[in-house]
Image: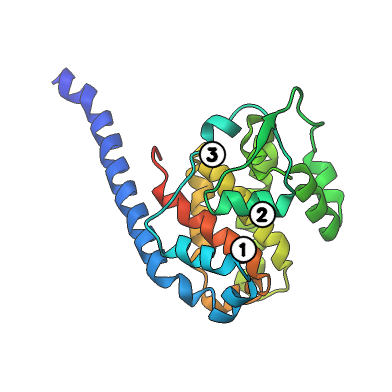
Amino acid sequence: MELGTALSPSAHVDRRSVVLRGALLQRRAELRKSWRLLISKECLRSLGSLGPEVESFLSGQGAIHDWRTVAASNWIACDANFSDCLREVALAGEIGYRPLESSPAPLSLADLNKLSGPERFTALCDRYRCPLNIGVASEFELAEELLRQLMVVDRVKLESGADFDADMVLLKLTLVGIRAMIARDLRSLDAQNYFYELPRRSLTRMRANPPFFAFWLCIYAQLPCAPDW
């Protein structure tokens, strides 16, 4: 009797893992079929030479680059700019990086929230020029604030039809998605699921920035394929 009781929690955990894995793979299969409803042919054409890469990636079997050993503990520096780094992360590519001897000064939540929308956008792009740094342990509080804003402030605006900063929402989604990829954080994954499941009309404004929107979808497409959730 004691042995059965002792094994029960592990059995439940194993069962949850199997159910979760099945749900994640089902979502990836759905996305593989439905992404064209989100990114139009015109949107793909506007991406230029990047369009075929995005099309192949979203239609493929689920490529993923496991960045956990790179970005879990120490800050890294990348020679490329924010957009180029984000593209490589989104398409499971390679990034030239080097470890930093010291972390940058903390960015407090109070200071971040005092900034105007454009200033906040610039501050986050500058801080996460290498977006993988959102996964560093020291960025936990800031990542939590971005997640809170997505699921409270931005969610209310979207559900009520109020005006919102589409580029800022996409930036937060990509950073929180990368955080989910590195930290295997289910709450961050849930935020991605929520925005993906929004009615198509709610995503119209976010599609006005085709590269950013495509990068977010490619990051989202990687999450169901990631092991060890």
Above or below 4: residue 136: below
Above or below 5: residue 217: below
| Residue behind mark 1 | 155
Marks 2 and 3 sit apart, C-alpha to C-alpha, by 15 Å
> Which of the two discs, 2 and 3, sits closer to the camera?
3
Marks 1 and 2 sit apart, C-alpha to C-alpha, by 12 Å
Callouts 2 and 3 close, C-beta under 8 Å: no
| Residue behind mark 2 | 172
Residue 175: image x %, image y %? 63, 49
Q: Residue furthest left?
A: 1
Marks 1 and 3 sit apart, C-alpha to C-alpha, by 24 Å
Q: Nearer the viewer, residue 225 or 157?
A: 225
- Badge 2 or badge 3: first in the primary sequence: 2
Residue 210, by quadrant, is bottom right
Q: Residues within 10 Å of mark 2 (few under 14, many from 20)?
A: many
Instruction: Judge left or right: residue 118 versus residue 7.
Output: right
Q: Residues within 10 Å of mark 1 (few under 14, many from 20)?
A: some
Q: Nearer the viewer, residue 163 or 96?
A: 96
Residue 179: image x %, image y %? 58, 43
Amino acid beneath label 2: Lys
Residue 15, by quadrant, is top left
Look at the numbered disc 3 and give the secondary structure of its residue. Answer: helix
Amino acid beneath label 3: Ile
- Badge 1 or badge 2: first in the primary sequence: 1
Say which quadrant the C terminus sits in: top left
Q: Residue at x 65, y 36 (%)?
A: 140
- Badge 1 or badge 3: first in the primary sequence: 1
Q: Nearer the viewer, residue 80 or 204?
A: 80
Amino acid beneath label 1: Arg
| Residue behind mark 3 | 182
> Which of the two discs, 1 and 3, sits closer to the camera?
3
